[in-house]
Image (tube, rainbow, N blue to C red):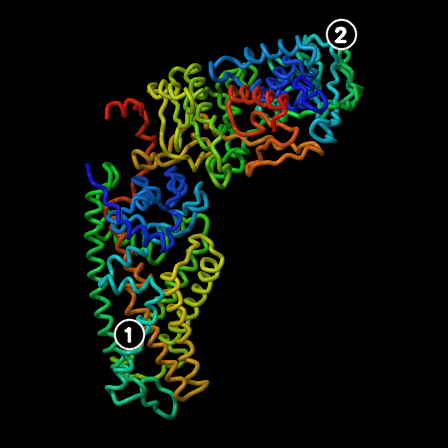
Amino acid sequence: MERLEPNLGFLRSLRRQGGESLKKCFQCGTCSAVCNLTPNASPFPRKEMLWAQWGLKGPLIADPDIWLCHGCGDCSANCPRGANPSEVLGALRNQTIEEYSGPRSFAKAFRDGRFLLLLLAIPILFMVVAFAWRGGLAFPTGTVEYANFIPEQTIELTLGSWLLLTLIVAVAGLSRFWKGMLAFEERYRPAGGAGTASGGGWAGWKWVLGQVFGHQQFGKCQRTASRRWQHLLIFYGFLLLFFATLGRTYYHYIWHYDYELPLFNVVKLAGNLGGIILLVGLGAVIYTRFLRGVGQAISVYFDWFFVTILGFTALTGFLTELSRLEFPGPDSYLIYLSHLFFIFLLLVYLPFSKFGHILYRTLALYHLHRTGRVGVPIASEPTSSVAELPSKEIAAG
Amino acid sequence: MASGLPGLPGLLVIGGGISGLSASLEAAETGNEVYLVEREPYLGGRVAGMNRYFPKLCSPQCGLEINFRRLRQNKALRVFTLAEVEKVEGQAGDFTVTVRLNPRYVNDRCTACGECVPACPVERRNARNYGMDTTRAVYLPGEVAEPFRYTIDPLACEGAKCGRCVEVCRYGAIDLEMASSTVTLRVGRIVLATGWRPYDPALISTLEFGHFPDIVTNVMMERLAADGGPTGGELRRPSDGQPAKRVAFVQCAGSRDQNHLAYCSGVCCLASLKQATYVLERYPDASVHIFFIDIRTPGGFEIFYQRLQADPRIKFVKGKVARVLQEPGGDLMVEAEDLLAGRMFRLPVDLLVLATGMVPEAMPLPPGIKIPRDPYGFAVPSPGIWPVGLAKRPMDVQSCVRDATGGILKAIGGEG
């Protein structure tokens, strides 16, 4: 017999992160039956609801299944008890991100508004120190060229070194998550639960790429099909902006050109298009989910933190572009600095914020395909039956 | 009044189902003047429509028959069928009740010979069989109807311009010109025995009732198994008449669900267990699956559950069905999580029975009856008015009989 180890702190934290209703669950299994995304072997979210009620942090934070869920809310809509499995899984994903992003005490600061100033102060302090070291803040005169203010190379080197730190945190987190999932597979998957473990390697990554670039699983959600398109917009908007950033670096190193690119330059076009797409998608998400509460309806500080930063990054980007022409002078350089500030928050804090889902979901999906969980066919009849008389069992025990 | 309490001696019982019948008989046999008003053309209510009933799993006819005999022997009891309370005036101790008597179009000369039926050219939906078959516009309401007389459905009948039934009736029992009338009663107390109806299964969208013909409710299952049912008691699939040998029961269909009925009716588990025995008696090689959240067999009925658990042909599966599908030409499929095994399954079945719960009959109460209701619509006693049986809360037949007797004791004793 195995000892259960309830973790009350984890349970409390989970309830604060949107899982408030989890105690209402009475294990009827409606949620698993209505879910379009659950694997057929040890389906979710019913088992997660039980583990959560018991405060079993161990299996929950290593459970790859919660990353198959896109929070469409089919389960919550049909839940006879209002236990809101969809919200509970969302809270679990947030908890997982916190769990694996070291150092833990720093990761915790991302789910508590009291530490917001601390998080914002880090990039500001860094900028103050950097400018002081370089001899103070000096705004160039004449036509606004941001490269005259802070050289391209300086940005690449400083942001690059910060991102190296981020990368270390991310890789460490992912490797612990991977080990966690392997241990989970070993310990919790009931017999016959996993399929044949032949979905790894290229086949696995091919499937994962389909999910990442096509959001195929996301498209199976019933109630909120539109959320797939909203997320795709944000994803491709971000991707275009990412390529635009790479393009900028390409111009710097290949053509030694650091100044503003013309409007119809491919890199410039990609950046502007990406920014618009991203803002449209984000606006749709804020409207449907955060304001109207469709699908996963409870939005906690942790969710808002990421959404706000993403939005401000795009907005300050456009402002930077406009201010250069519309109101040249110190103002445009200050707006540029604020844009850099949000990029720092977005990218350097990636493994700690909700943005971290890009890492954990991707790895979890690969693991799920690798262990064959996504391909298990549905059984043709129930195999368990309550055939034993309860009174007999009690007598025997 | 027997108790000597102030007020008029008479007692009005609204509803002639098992609760109303019991209440009327108990009151009349203790020397009270009783008026029993029933909306349908027959007495016995939903119990009369069952195949077997608890506790002894006998036909409801045997229990009802005793009550009907008591009723016929008692002169203090006046029964109005096809009657509706139109208006209630006054207060506890002194009610003036207007009752509308709808025409039966068949008088007491009817011998129930049935020769009018083949003459009748019109078919009507048979509400007693939940629309699974039809009858002619002239019909006998139930295998053993009380009163044992034919009746004519005015919504279906073409009236005097047809008149073929009048021609064939040798007893002059049919009068298509019969009109409705009203009677005024003065009573001191009212007993509300308005009963229940099944929760509307069409509201439970995941269970697809109404989309596939082989999905029925538990009350329909009683009719499928009953001699007077649409298949004459042969358990057959409504879709194509094939034997229903693979039968699944969905417990808590809409019950214990905050989106539907937040409460447990307390009878549906035993009803499904009972109906599982219908299937196995009819087809010994049948298989039955019962999908449940918890099996609730209150009182001494645990032993009935244990007996069925021991039968390998009945499988009790923990897991709520929340998806039903059928490919054209394919089997009806039930999808759920098998909780104890931790896996999803998709089971082909011939017949899917939804164990729906009980809701208080939604008939609007006649003007003048003001009675508080609980959050689920069940009536709460108020001065001069006693709800009994299903008007008060979900319960089984024997509880209704007990509750009606207790209610009468309170009504004639003046409590409340």
Q: Quadrant of the N terminus of chain B?
A: top right
Give B215 or B199, whichever is nearer the viewer.
B199
Residue B123 showing in the rendered view: no
Q: Is residue A321 left or right of residue B30?
A: left
Q: Position of residue A97 (x, y in %)?
A: 28, 58
Rendered image: mark on residue B171: 2
Q: Quadrant of residue B173?
A: top right
The residue wearing badge 1 is A122
Amino acid type, label 1: Ile
Along the horizontal axis of the image, is A371 left or right of A210? left
* Of the pair B1 and A207, the residue shown nearer to us: B1
Q: How many marks?
A: 2
Determine whether A140 is above or below B357 in the image: below
Whether residue B305 appears in this view of the structure is yes
Chain name for mark 1? A
> Residue B320 placed where, x, y %?
40, 35
Amino acid type at mark 2: Tyr
Q: Are marks 1 and 2 in contact (CB under 8 Å)?
A: no
Residue name at image x 39 percent, y 45 percent: A36
Q: Are marks 1 and 2 on the same chain?
A: no
User: Which quadrant holds the C terminus of chain B?
Assistant: top right
Q: In this rendered view, identify the residue nearer to me: B70 or B314.
A: B70
Above or below — where is A9 with respect to B71? below
Q: Is residue B220 left or right of residue B75?
A: left
Q: Residue furthest bottom?
A: A142
Q: Residues within 10 Å of mark 2 (few under 14, many from 20)?
A: few
Please, which chain is the residue tagged with disc 2 on? B
CA distance for labels 1 and 2: 102 Å
Secondary structure at badge 1 equals: helix
Q: Residue at left 55%, top 36%? A: B376
Give the residue at x 21% y 53%.
A178
What's the mark number on residue B382?
none
